Amino acid sequence: MEAEPRIQPLSSTESLCPVCLRRLQAAREQQGDTVYLVKRCGEHGTTRTSIWRGPIPFSSWLRPKNPSSPRQALTEIRDGCPFDCGLCPGHGQHTCTALLEITGRCNLRCPVCFADAGESDADPSLAQIGGWYDRVMAASGPCNIQLSGGEPTMRPDLGRIVRLGRDKGFDFIQLNTNGLLLAERPQLAGELRQAGLASVFLQFDGLSAATHLALRGRDLRADKESAIRRCVEAGLAVVLVPTLVPGINTGEIGAIIEYGLGFAPTVRGVHFQPISYFGRYPQPPADADRLTLPEVLSLIEAQTAGAVRVEHFAPPACEHALCSFHGNFLIDGQGRLAPLGQPPACCSTGEAQACLPSALEGREKSVRYTARQWSLPMAEPACACNGEPAVPKDDFDRFLARARTHTFSLSAMAFQDVWNIDLERLRGCCIHVVSPAGRLVPFCAYNLTSNLGRPLHRRARAA
Amino acid sequence: MTSFSFAETTAWQCAGCDLPLQPAEVKVSYLNSVFNVELMVCPGCGFVLVPESLATGKMLAVEQLLEDK
């Protein structure tokens, strides 16, 4: 009989009790090739959740940065993280993307939905949404905006909401959508493009009927493709966003990438979201029901015939290193992916660094990169002399011309739930939901619920 | 890869060698990508002059595309 691998303590952080949401000390500890977040509530016992599994050493993925506090904090520190979100002065990262939930209504009833959509509260008015844009600008300055919900296309005034954001100084506005109405209404994509929308963040879970039935309750394959074709016609960029669920669609990762490449340059990349568990789960989800970032990377490598490899990816400069990965690629003449540039060689040796990059610097890079990569490329620059498109003349031109239209990003973001929430990660969060009252709340804190579905912020503290 | 000339007559001289610069083919590499271009080079020590317009124009655009976020 084999002995259990030894448990090795790695580092400490803070977390929450999944039952009572009390703040707890927590430890990251390694056993074999798995890192666990371990915490103990005096009343509700010990929770041990896998947070990192696979071939990439946990310590190699760290990318520490000097925290940078909000330029205007909208709440005070009273009860401490994560109870004062708004952002409070203790938050360590600025907004890269502000998420505006412009409706709670949805035209799907997905078994999987972080936003708890489908409820019938009245939609916020255009004036209220204008106030949210103003709050984001005051607290964080220009950043990327994602319109979300519910299903934001349920609003007939969506174009006006996009235009309002553009008029208020937000250059990159993205629509988080299931795509059904884009498919159903031929004019919608064009209207939104005209209004100033840059990009569609399209829920796209896979290519098999079984995946759609399991995650969305309906076979949506034809609708998804139709939505993408409408975006092609309208000149709107698309990012495919699969929610990855072990045992459901983890075998379709390579096929989804291949499918996206077939629609380049309209499809700008694939952004994977391993499932997290919000809502009512009286028993903790099993570790087998989770998928950590290194596992997603291994699956990408295994399903792309060696074209894409784990070493082509890097931890983020903006959010906490444990929250995401990204890689940027050039699509070559044969439609294959080749890594573009190279990730920083690598990220941490575990030694303290004398000079850490600032969180603000990472945020600036990320805002620019996201807006560029997730938008459609600019038209070819015209030659000033005769109005004809410029012909590439040298290697730089040739590279620029290809890269302008044929870059493709692969990325993933691991959202946190009540079992794996790590307050160090939360303080480094750059994706902020604007609450109905105009507070900016880190995405995972906003959606977090106790094991019985009691929210930490959504509704409970939102008003 | 093909080359293209950014070489142009210049008043600059190589201070170390005291020689006028001459056009020559140069390999510019950055983050695993290689670009062959023609630039003004010192025939003595190989020192390369990158014109400001190139450095702040195309080269900057290329750098930004290659750099990781």
Image (spheres, coloured by chain):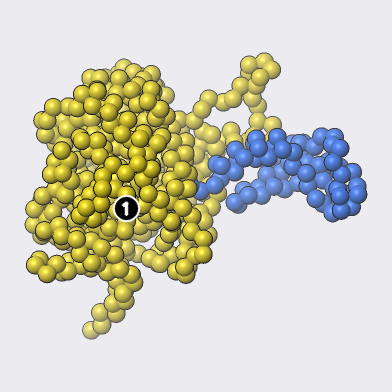
Identify the image quadrant of residue A153. top left
Residue A308, given in percent of the width and then of the height, sits at 46, 52
Q: How many numbered discs sit on the rendered protein?
A: 1
Chain identifier of the blue chain: B
* Residue A106 can be seen in this image: no
Determine the residue positioned at 49% across, 30% down: A377
Horizontal side of residue A408 vs A227, given as left or right = right
User: Looking at the picture, how far across and down is residue A104, in whole percent?
Assistant: 17, 32
Mark 1: amino acid: Gly
Supply the letter of whichever chain is yellow: A
On screen, residue A297 versus residue A206, left or right, reads right
A217 displayed left or right of B22: left
What residue is drawn where x is 23% and y is 67%? Answer: A25
A19, above or below A5, in the image? above
Q: Is residue A366 above or below residue A288?
A: above
Give the vertical position of A235 relative to B17 (above or below).
above
Query: Judging from the image, what secondary structure is the residue with disc 1 in?
Result: loop
Location of mark 1 (residue): A90
